[in-house]
Image (tube, rainbow, N blue to C red):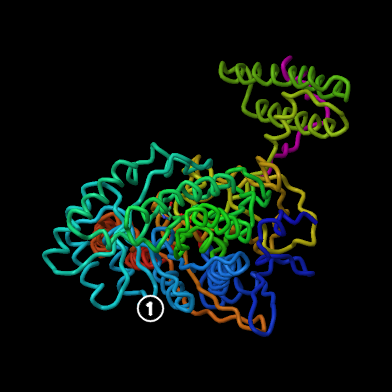
Amino acid sequence: ANTYGIKEWGADYFDLSPSGEVVVRTTSETGQTETSLLDIIRGAEARGLGMPLLLRIENLLDQQITRLNESFSQAMKDSGYTGSYQGVFPIKVNQQAQIIEEITRFGSRFNHGLEAGSKGELMIALSMIQSTKSLIVCNGYKDPEFIDLGLQTTRMGYKVFFVIETPTELPIILERSNALGIEPLIGVRIKLSSRGSGHWQDSGGDNSIFGLTTSQVVDVMDLLKKHDMLHCLQLLHYHLGSQIPNIRDIRTAVRETARYYADMVREGAPMGYLDLGGGLAVDYDGSKTNFVHSKNYSLDEYTADVVEVLMSVLDERSVAHPTVITESGRATVSYCSILLFNILDVTQYTPGRFPETEPDDAPESIRNMYEVRRTLSVRNLQECYNDAIYYREEIREEFEYGKITLRQRALADNLFMDIIHQIADLLKKVKRPPRALEELQEGLYDIYYGNFSVFQSLPDVWAIDQIFPVMPIHRLNEQPRRKAILADITCDSDGKIDTFGAVHDIQKSILLHEPRDDEEYYLGVFLVGAYQETLGDLHNLLGDPHVVSVRINSDGGFEFVREIEGDSIADVLSYVEYQPKDLVENFRRKLEQAVRDGRLSVAQRRTLLQAYETGMRGYTYYER
Ligand code: PLP
């Protein structure tokens, strides 16, 4: 069966069951268990939560935090690194309360902290952090209010680092610190000259809009020395960009940063923390390459390389090993969320019925098209393709000038599509098909309409052509035979998924099963836990889908630990400043007028008003 590369991108969390369903594999003290996603869907539907559904599996979040922390600990132990690892989760990557609650709850055993990039995120961090041993790293713009809040919480024992991103920040921090009589913990973010490849390469490198240049770092140290506060400078930070696919770029950046670190120690700053930012990539297409949607390293290679490069630079200069911080967001949360939806309809790219031989009244152009079909063979594919295109154009023109009827045009369209299909079939017998015809094959696909919105749930698919693994979550013992792309229900021509990551390849379509009348066909988009939820928008007023958080037990059973109903129509209308109550009242008045005018009976008025009110409370997606 086509496995859709699940073994390659599934990171051992997702696999196929013998009965042909996607299972999620979780680990507990008693071993591993497998749970079918279809069972979870059935459980959600029984609770009244239909498709689409954003499913969060808490265990996977816990397991990723564990993998990250344990991998760093092991790498440090193996190489005799004397510092330690302390991760922080960058809130921007997924700000949802459930996610942050779980990260801080579970992460407290590793003192896993949070990174805040704005005032709002600082508010989340200060309230949600569970252990005073966990770090709060503040990046981004910081106004006096932000700084005051952060400074004062250090009195409560919290370690709140202010990372200086622009030269103007330090004087404000010093001023507020002086006013409040509280010493700050200061870090600096540097612009590296090395930069990673991939989508976000501009976040790092000389042209990065964030971070200090070498001379600005020197100015920071000088200003701190002048105020006798160099001892507050304890952290060095860079962020190379998200999703760095090539380990070589990571090694280069760590090496450059280690040199900065060593020199800052030499300048007399106590330091102690080295924050390597995010960038740890996710293998979305399963190719394990340095392609933008993949990565050519494992987690263990990443941690071992970071530790090795750091030690090689710092040991040479006899600098004590710092606590390593990473701000891994994508790699931490991607796996735990899956977007599940059902297929509502399919448009098949197949010809309708047409007579085997030309009708007596067929015009010349249609007779010619029949002739192309009769003469088609492996030897004249390109010629027949050109002719078919030519006659189709001729027929379209004739239709435009009223020379042929709608029925004749429909016959010609079916005939053309049949010829194209036959060419595509014959192409399989040709060793080296002409290039133009290869493209023809790519264009022959069905459109599967999915009950979801790309703009709401997968904004990166639209905005940056992000590839996520997409596959049916059941019927995987059956051979899928339909070549398809996916369209959402926004009716926007960009509301589609038409690029799929195949292992070592990118494909313009995916093989899917023929939907059955008596059974829903469910698809999942995997690894969607990072960046997608809050970047999503209300295009066509399709709102948040239902969200359920599931915890899988050691016996493979599961609990619905949280259920959040998706937006209702009233919710999304109020987001764009309508008052649902006023809308109902307006509509009620219109109905009353219609009764007065004799267009509606009172009973009809009542039915219509009820339908309007029920619609207002309903889900924004297609409800069966
Ligand atoms: N840290 C900073 C400063 C960021 O801007 C980002 C996002 O790009 C991250 C961390 C998270 O990066 P990633 O999701 O690649 O781990």
Residue sitting at x 59%, y 69%? 77
Q: Which residues are magenta?
A: 347-367
Task: Say above or below: 310 vs 51.
Answer: above
Residue sitting at x 47%, y 46%? 256
Q: Is residue 96 left or right of residue 33?
A: left
The quadrant holding residue 444 is top right
Q: Quadrant of the N terminus?
A: bottom right
Decide if residue 621 is in sight here. no
Asked if the stretch drawn in magenta spans residue 404, the answer is no
Tell me residue 514's x, y (percent). Answer: 72, 53
Q: Secondary structure at mark 1?
A: loop
Tell me residue 206's x, y (percent). Answer: 40, 37
Task: Say above or below: 457 vs 607.
Answer: above
562, 139: nearer the viewer: 139
Q: Which residue is mark 1?
A: 130
| Dominant secondary structure, magenta | loop
Task: Say above or below: 445 vs 152.
Answer: above
Residue sitting at x 13%, y 63%? 178
Q: Is residue 14 left or right of residue 356?
A: left
Q: Is residue 607 left or right of residue 524?
A: left
The quadrant holding residue 585 is bottom left
Is the distance from the Cβ of mark 1 to the nearest ligand 1 atom less than 8 Å?
Answer: no
Task: Say above or below: 398 vs 239.
Answer: above
Decide if residue 313 is in sight here. yes
Q: Kindly identify the amino acid type of the residue bearing the numbered disc 1.
A: Gln
**Ligand 1 location (quadrant):** bottom left
